[in-house]
Image (cartoon, helix red, strand yellow):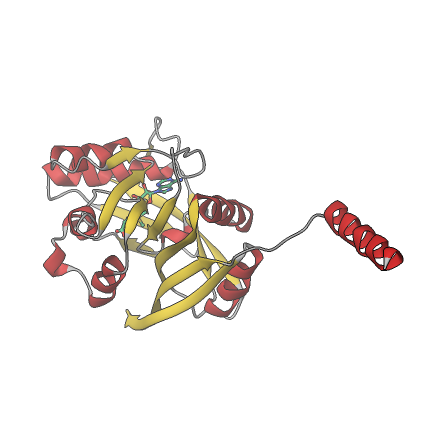
Amino acid sequence: MRYLENSKASNFIFGEAIYEYSKNKDTKLELIKKDKTIFTIDLDYYFRDYKDLSNIEKKALSLAKGEILDVGCATGYYIPKLKKFGIVDAIDISEHLIRIAVENGIKECHVADIFKYKPSGDYDTITLLENNLGLGGTLLKTKKLFKILAKLLKPDGRIIAIIRHTDYKKKYYSSEYLPLWNGSLGKKFRWFYFNIKFLRKFCNKFKLKLEILDEDVDEGRKMYLLGKIQKLMQLSFSKKTLVNLYLQYLVILLIF
Ligand SMILES: C[S@@+](CC[C@H](N)C(=O)[O-])C[C@H]1O[C@@H](n2cnc3c(N)ncnc32)[C@H](O)[C@@H]1O
């Protein structure tokens, strides 16, 4: 078995495989789980037209508005529709995927890592579809991701996300995958899955309020459309401010 030498991260292999698929439909990408189960990724999925999207995806796109950021946009197949609802910035960590988007005339897509992304302004809507809320892979990185997303939202902004595999008994689950592409093994990577009840609590930690808008069953497992993961307005005072307010109150009491 050959190991891919230039693959710093599995996300790059994912993009490279899809890029090769765009030129040669025989390209196959498989993921091997820790328990050795192997499943083949349907690469055609990343070249779907709007009419081929599921109802839940169509609904998710229709909820976007204003200044929109699509995180992990892949080949940019959602972008033509998203553009009808607002001004779109779309990012993906894979140069190969963005190359496909650009070759297809989708100019809104850029190579960027959400963990390092520094836009000039904040967003009304951030979309994370196809379980992209799990791209952090571990609990620590997912916390980091939520912190970043909450910061990138305007005060009344919202995150629209679709999540799958929410029925684990545990609060969350981090799954490890080994990519196998054209007979070559890539670098292992992790994806993070939330139990839906835990996700609500997790959102609250980041001053985000979760609202479930729809649910569907996909391959026997529940899939949720999350909308309005909305910033809670914060009315917070520092300790120093509270002490000052208390002292002022005492002074007023003493004067009168
Ligand atoms: C499961 S695919 C989903 C693609 C697409 N949003 C969809 O719904 O079909 C995850 C995508 O996230 C991208 N990605 C992974 N980590 C990322 C990061 N740190 N910053 C930006 N994009 C990332 C991958 O390259 C990949 O295209």
Residue 117, percent from left and from top:
41, 34
Furthest toward the top, the residue is: 6
In this rendering, the answer to whether 62 lies above or below 214 is above
Quarter of the image with the C terminus is bottom right
Residue 13, percent from left and from top:
30, 37
Q: Is residue 1 visible?
A: no
Residue 181, percent from left and from top:
26, 40
Q: Is residue 232 visible?
A: yes
Q: Give whichever of 237, 120 is nearer the camera.
A: 237
Quarter of the image with the N terminus is top left
Tell me what residue is drawn at x 12 percent, y 33 percent: 103
Tell me what residue is drawn at x 21 percent, y 41 percent: 18
Tell me what residue is drawn at x 30 percent, y 47 percent: 68
Horizontal side of residue 86 vs 172, given as left or right = left
Tell me what residue is drawn at x 35 percent, y 31 percent: 7
Furthest toward the right, the residue is: 254
Q: Give whichever of 116, 151 is nearer the camera.
A: 151
Q: In which quarter of the image is ligand 1?
A: top left
Horizontal side of residue 217 vs 167, given as left or right = left
Q: How many labels does the image show?
A: 0
In this rendering, the answer to whether 56 lies above or below 231 is below
